[in-house]
Image (tube, helix red, strand yellow):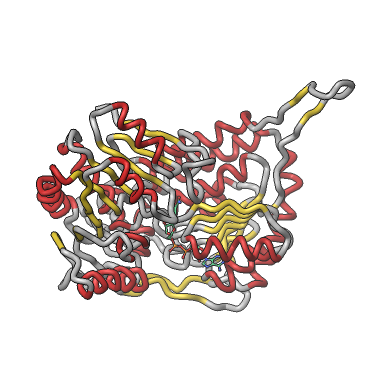
Amino acid sequence: MGSVASDTPIETRLFINGEFVPSKSGKTFEVKNPATLKHVAHVSEASVEDVDIAVEAAKAAFPAWSALAAMERQGWLYKLADAFDAELSEISRLEALSMGKPTYQDVSAMGTAIMRYQVGKAYDIQGETSLHTPGFVNMTFRQPFGVTAGIIPWNVTWLMLIMKMTPALVSGNTMVLKTSEKSPLSPLIAGKAMKKIGFPKGVFNIVHGFGRPTGEALSKHMEIRKLSFTGSAPTGRLIKKAAAESNLKNVTLELGGKSPLLIFPDADLSKAVPAAAYSILMNSGQACIASSRVYVHESIAQDFITQMKTAMQSMGKSGDPLAEGTLRGPQADQLQFDRVLSFLDHAKEQKVPTALGGSKESNTGGLYIEPTIFTSVPEDSKLMREEIFGPVVCINTFTDEAEVLKRANDTEYGLYGSVFTRDVSRALRIAKSLEAGTIGINCTSRLLVLICRLAGSSRVGRGGKGASMSLIIGLS
Ligand code: NAD
């Protein structure tokens, strides 16, 4: 999508029961543009009372919505997808303004493709039968939960909204969605589109606010039967605990990553280098599936690092997120920026070799971090163990396959892993041994979000042993 200029007024209220409403308390929080640090909007903050009102609206809407034929729900959601498509440039503008994602490489358009795919799955929701017990016929019915909740992060806001909302609604549930305090603006386009097409009121409601009290009010709510969360592991733990202490609601968690990328001597570096660079620079490194730990075979390490420096410098050119051609924006807000800087300071203190970058970008007026490569990083360093969520990659070397697999799997995360090699047996051996929910062979996270959703990947918590895994193989 090209550059986006618009004077369209920005909606900042809650969306409850088909209407935009201010919070009961009148409380708001500020969103600033991370590229300029200038004020963008004051957004309504939902109190516990607002959450209760939204849940009531969703509860009231449930009987009629769940009683519709699947085909009728599909009809509404296809109509909504068309209405969303008409708003794509506004969605991109709002994401750029609130969290700095460049409009030029925005992936929001993928949202409606995913939405149409998920809507099409409505008729695949079926129960099972068995004749295993003599004298009986056994059947299962797959029924909607009732009121569900979605809690989303800020890094791919619009995609997250689509991926929470569509499966819930098409299968007959209603929903209250909480946006992230860092990126609450683009979700309100969903409310605007619903009003435009006369979408049934109360079926989908949007509240804004922080973890406490807004998110907590949802995770503790006694009327919510199912909660789908995407965000960090610490928050995931709090949500499961709140669910356990309230009504034991069913909880689905999609958490963070510290994904390993293994590069063997026979890898095609003309593919591996741009893939590795793109993976850590996409969305300024603020991607759960970023390949943030690279293990390259010692025999090609020098060559690989030299090529990575060149690739990251050219692909990581920063600029105004609203300008056409900007490849990399700022970090999302001051908190994220300070967090990344704390990792860079730690690297300096520990004298970790720095092949590229290592500091904030000066003279930008915004929250920009230099594309950074650390090498020979101790495996027990927090640089290797924690999610940095910035354009910062650690590159270590290896000589032995079994030993590098051990290091790659020595993490509490298990979201994604990848390998570059021309040896088919080795590729499949590595894929089988990496403990992650999705594995890329000769590819990294470019377009991965879309591909693995369509492959039905289980990207929840730790994959690998005892969990399903999906495999994505680059063929070129
Ligand atoms: P976060 O955990 O800080 O916040 C996520 C959401 O949870 C926000 O809406 C926040 O307000 C809310 N929240 C915070 N505390 C809460 C509480 N106590 N109860 C209920 N809700 C609460 O994460 P973030 O910084 O917004 O997002 C970045 C994280 O998300 C990273 O770890 C990233 O890897 C992960 N992520 C994962 C995926 C995936 O598909 N697995 C996709 C995108 C992002």
Please indicate whether residue 315 sits to the left or right of residue 343 in the image.
left
**What residue lies at 44% left-to-right and 35% top-to-bottom?**
470
Q: Is residue 6 visible?
A: no
Please indicate whether residue 142 sits to the left or right of residue 454 in the image.
right
Expressed as whole percent of the image width and height from the top left, the position of residue 341 reads 27, 71
Q: Is residue 38 visible?
A: yes
Picture quadrant of residue 237: bottom right
**What residue lies at 51% left-to-right and 46% top-to-bottom?**
163
Disc count in the image? 0
**What residue lies at 21% left-to-right and 54% top-to-bottom?**
326
Residue 157 position (above or below residue 416): below
Picture quadrant of residue 222: bottom right
Residue in the foreground of this view, choosing between 87 and 367: 367
Question: What is the quadrant of the C terminus in the image?
Answer: top left
- Name of the residue lying farthest toward the right: 135
Residue 305 position (above or below residue 141): below
Expressed as whole percent of the image width and height from the top left, the position of residue 277 reads 22, 49
Expressed as whole percent of the image width and height from the top left, the position of residue 300 reads 13, 43
Please indicate whether residue 357 sits to the left or right of residue 342 in the image.
left
**What residue lies at 20% left-to-right and 60% top-to-bottom?**
374
Expressed as whole percent of the image width and height from the top left, the position of residue 251 reads 62, 53
Residue in the foreground of this view, choosing between 450 and 189: 450
